[in-house]
Amino acid sequence: MMLFPQAPSHRAFRVWVRHLVYYRSFYLAEWAGNLGEHILWLVAFGYGLGRLVPNLDGISYAQFIGPGLMVSVAMWNATYESTYGAYSRMRIQNVYESMLMAPLTVGDIVLGDLLWCASRALIGSTLMLVVLSLFGLVGSLWAVAILPILFIEAVMFAALGLIATSLAHSFSFFNFYFSAIVMPMFFFAGTLFPIKGLPIWVERLSEALPLTHAVRISRGLFIYGHVENFIWHFSFLLGFTFLFLTVACVLVSRRMVE
């Protein structure tokens, strides 16, 4: 710890607990909103648009987009919490500055924040899994194994969002971040339609997106109970997670000094 004074420690859990205590004051309203939004997405796209889409490799369009929606929920929830939420805590409410008065390092604060963002994202994805189960779209009991994968994915996107937050000087910056980074990833990661058959540059772009690998793992477990090239996809997720986490710690440390 003396060599790396900003490195995270077990005290990051205390930061996570702080956010959980605050979350308890409004979680029921959020859960109700999440359930309604998840059902709307599934009905509008899975069954509305799905009537116009033929079966894809022997499965319905609703079942095809099911795991994609779970992965997308994790990404969006983690991203919103690590951008708008974290920016408010860092620059407006001065929560980060107050935490530094306790025996916490910047690394503790960053890791605790990321774990909370991932936990909140996992709650949203779990509710999506419940909705998909009620509609009878789950093809394998291995679908439950998606949840730890989604947690890792959520940490990764929370870290990426925190990087954006450390660079932002106002809320307006996030309009650029969402338009240039998050939205293209959502559309070109195979969440709502197959990438195969599109121009070769789109396929190569998709292969480079971390969300694509989360989608493929989730779709394999959700529908078939197994994943081709699982080690490659999982290693891709882990690599980006550690990379973004390291960069987030460095940039937030610099921002706190300003």
Image (cartoon, rainbow, N blue to C red):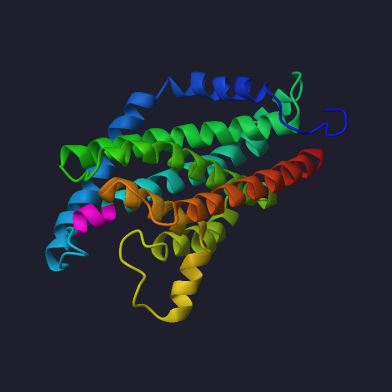
| Residue drawn where x is 61% and y is 29% of the image | 112
- Residue 19, by quadrant, is top right
Quadrant including the C terminus: top right
Depth check, front residue: 84 or 63: 63
State left or right for residue 67 relative to residue 5: left
**Farthest residue, direction bottom:** 199
Magenta span includes 62: yes
Depth check, front residue: 141 or 35: 141
Percent position of residue 101, x then y = 76, 21
Part of the protein shown in magenta:
61-65
Q: Is residue 78 visible?
A: yes
Quadrant including the N terminus: top right
Q: Is residue 34 visible?
A: no
**Farthest residue, direction left:** 51
Task: Reply above or below: 115 against 227.
Answer: above
State left or right for residue 199 relative to residue 110: left
